[in-house]
Image (cartoon, grey):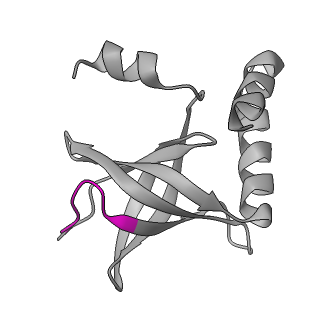
């Protein structure tokens, strides 16, 4: 699949955001860094010793700062390529979606894009 095909299939605007993160897969915790995030998924640097496969269920945690600001999602691995792991969000708690929405609001120049993404969540 070409990059343009992948971008066309995305319904949610992604923002670039470098932050420390963890991916928990089958009771193993992997330390990594977030590359970008949207209301429906995220892209991470492939962790050292990563043993995940497409379709694996994972929990991701993105640390936004030194306090309790952590975005947590239950997700599935959607793809792995070019030393990146892409995940698709399946479930997110109210605290995490509130933090994620605020993060996107602060980083999206176009309020209309954010509203379109929120409406697409249904």
Q: Is residue 49 magenta?
A: no
Q: Quadrant of the C terminus?
A: top right
Magenta stretch, overall SS: loop
Seen in the image, is 105 located left or right of residue 6? right
Seen in the image, is 121 located left or right of residue 35? right
Q: Tell me if residue 22 can be seen.
A: no
Q: Position of residue 58 (x, y in %)?
A: 41, 68
Residue at (38% x, 51% y) in the render: 44
Q: Position of residue 82 (x, y in %)?
A: 19, 39
Residue at (21% x, 23% y) in the render: 1
Seen in the image, is 71 located left or right of residue 23? right
Seen in the image, is 41 located left or right of residue 98? left
Residue, far bottom: 27
Q: Position of residue 15 (x, y in %)?
A: 58, 33
Residue 114 falls in image quadrant = top right
Residue 119 falls in image quadrant = top right
Residue at (30% x, 57% y) in the render: 55
Residue at (23% x, 18% y) in the render: 2
Q: Nearer the viewer, residue 64 or 9?
A: 9
- 121 w.r.t. 66: above or below: above
Find the magenta span and give its range. Answer: 50-57
Residue, far front: 122
- 88 w.r.t. 75: above or below: above
């Amino acid at each position: 699949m070409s990059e343009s095909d992948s971008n066309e299939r995305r319904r949610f605007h992604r923002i670039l955001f470098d932050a420390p993160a963890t991916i928990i897969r089958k009771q193993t915790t992997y330390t990594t860094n977030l590359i970008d995030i949207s209301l429906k998924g995220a892209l991470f640097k492939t962790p050292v010793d990563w043993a995940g496969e497409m379709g694996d269920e994972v929990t991701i945690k993105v640390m936004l700062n030194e306090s309790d600001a952590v975005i947590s999602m239950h997700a599935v691995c959607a793809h792995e390529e070019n030393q990146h792991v892409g995940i698709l969000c399946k479930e997110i708690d109210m605290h995490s979606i509130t933090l994620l929405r605020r993060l996107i609001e602060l980083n999206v120049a176009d309020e209309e894009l954010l509203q379109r993404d929120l409406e697409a969540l249904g």
